[in-house]
Amino acid sequence: MIFTGVSRTAWILFAVTFWTRMFFITGGYHRYFSHKAYKTSRVFQFILGYGGCTAAQKGPLWWAGHHRIHHRFADTINDPHTPRKGFWWSHAGWILSDDTTSAPLRSVKDFEKFPELRFISKHDWIAPWSLAVVCTLIGGWSGLLIGFVLSTVVLWHATFLINSLAHVFGSRRFETEDTSRNNALLAILTMGEGWHNNHHKAAYLARQGTKWWEIDFTWYVLFVLEKLHIIWGVKRPRTSSRTKVGPSAEVIDDSTEFVDEALAQAVLETESAALVHSGQAQNSTEP
Ligand SMILES: [Zn+2]
Ligand SMILES: [Zn+2]
């Protein structure tokens, strides 16, 4: 116990809601909705969407739409959280800005067609509030404050660090056109998302830590879900002959190769939409 009056239950809730929701963001919002790194049933798709929504980072359509634009225009002025506008902008300023209030639906047409996803995206307060109620019922006021509020705030900043620091601090294995980095500390904190340079090299892969020592807890969970037949069609790096049966997979395909037709089409439409948007922005700043 750190604070008097805060129960052990509240800290257990904190840990459970932090790590569970971290997975829903990394394995759900990111690797599934943004990059379609695997396939799943409509029911589990909804669970991923609702679970991600409990993290209070807006709905799956908003999150995935902006993230696809990030990959298409990484580090340019069209990147929603471009590091060119400074640390605070890339960390949280872009989310709070009026420019990004609405979901860029043109870049997520492949998921916009599901009414249940449109519903939780439109009413994106329902999921976090439902979790807040559950935490209060389990742990009382300290359950609410530590198990939900504090956990949510820490989760926000842990997630946002990928947009800010993972394009600034770390090493670069691949000469990608952006400034993405691999950072082991961020990888531990975010269940594998810190291997961000690997990710920008081949964004469609379900596995981002490709060396055996690159800890990627999101991948381990996805691996188990695949064994349980809850997900399938998992896009994994090609393994070299020496590591075929081992845990290491060191060969990464070219990131520009889109393996999913619908996603490729969505990205192309995102590009034209963003170019129109940037043209309007330039015009509007003209005297
Ligand atoms: Zn990035
Ligand atoms: Zn990504």
Image (cartoon, rainbow, N blue to C red):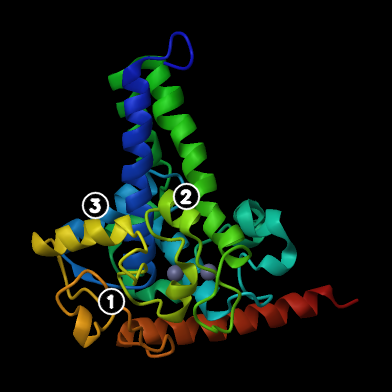
Residue 273, given in percent of the width and then of the height, sits at: 56, 81
Query: What residue sits right under mark 3 in the picture?
Result: 47
Looking at the rendered structure, the kind of residue marked 3 is: Ile
Helix, strand or loop for disc 2: loop
Per the rendering, the mark at residue 55 is none
Determine crowd level at label 3: few under 14, some 14-19, many 20+ residues with C-alpha closer than 10 A: some
Cα separation between marks 1 and 2: 32 Å
Looking at the rendered structure, the kind of residue marked 1 is: Ala
Residue shown at 63% from the left, 74% from the top: 75
Cα separation between marks 3 and 1: 29 Å
Decide: marks 3, 2 in contact (CB < 8 A)? no
Residue 53, given in percent of the width and then of the height, sits at: 38, 48
Per the rendering, the mark at residue 249 is 1
Residue shown at 39% from the left, 34% from the top: 129
Determine crowd level at label 1: few under 14, some 14-19, many 20+ residues with C-alpha closer than 10 A: many
Closest to the camera, between mark 1 and mark 2, is 1
Decide: marks 3, 1 in contact (CB < 8 A)? no
Count numbered badges in the picture: 3
Per the rendering, the mark at residue 57 is 2
Helix, strand or loop for disc 3: helix
The mark nearer the N terminus, 3 or 1, is 3
Quarter of image, res 166: bottom right
